[in-house]
Image: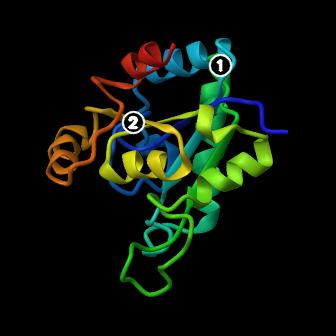
Amino acid sequence: MKTRRAVFLDRDGTLNEDTGYPADFRQVHIYPAAFEAVRLLRQAGFAAVVVTHQSGLGRGYFDEKELDALHARFLKEFARRGAPLDGLYSCPHAPEGAAGSGCSCAKPRPGLGLRAERELGLDLGASYMVGDKPDDVLFGLNIGAVPILVLTGYGRGAAAELAARGVRPAHTAAGVLEAAAWIL
């Protein structure tokens, strides 16, 4: 039964600084406001679910063991700060056009959202997607969620790109905490 609302959250540029292709948690700088945003969303009954494209694995910048360790520390840090995440779903594939690409899980394709829906019992139509790139907004639309663009990370450039393509997020926020406040 799909009864749980969720807020899908991009990782790099939304919850933490986009530092390229971090292979170690020490290279990840989580925005302090991200903890409060997740805490507030969870207190309001939302599942907080990270959806992230980590093409550094497909590009050979790090291996699966390193990515798994980084994500384990990421989840542990949010839990330690009183803001546990309900799930973290990652696409490891190289970008479109590279060898081995063409997967169903790279945003804006809906694969990660559909998997989370199935595994966590989510109601995608009552959910939100928060991210800093055009693919995040399009992913939200593709899964039937309300898309919110944040201006952190690549957000400012994404706003112009989306406008040029005639795509409008439901809301544009300065960062993830402002996005959470708008949702609530």
Q: Which of marks 2 and 1 is nearer the N terminus?
A: 2
Question: Does residue 90 show up?
Answer: yes
Q: Residue under circle 2?
A: 14
| Residue at left offset 40%, top offset 22% | 179
Question: Does residue 67 show up?
Answer: no
The quadrant in which residue 47 appears is top right
| Residue at left offset 48%, top offset 74% | 58
Decide if residue 18 is on the left or right side of residue 50: left
| Residue at left offset 60%, top offset 61% | 111
Tag 2's secondary structure? loop
How packed mark 2 is, by other alpha carbons closer than 10 Å (few <14, some 14-19, many 20 or more), is: many
CA separation, marks 2 and 1? Answer: 17 Å
Q: Nearer the viewer, residue 25 or 56?
A: 56
Decide if residue 85 is on the left or right side of residue 171: right
Q: What residue type is labelled 1?
A: Arg
Q: Which of 27 and 128 is in front in this view?
A: 128
The quadrant in which residue 163 appears is top left
Residue 72, horizontal then vertical, whole percent: 66, 44
Q: Which amino acid does label 2 sit on?
A: Thr
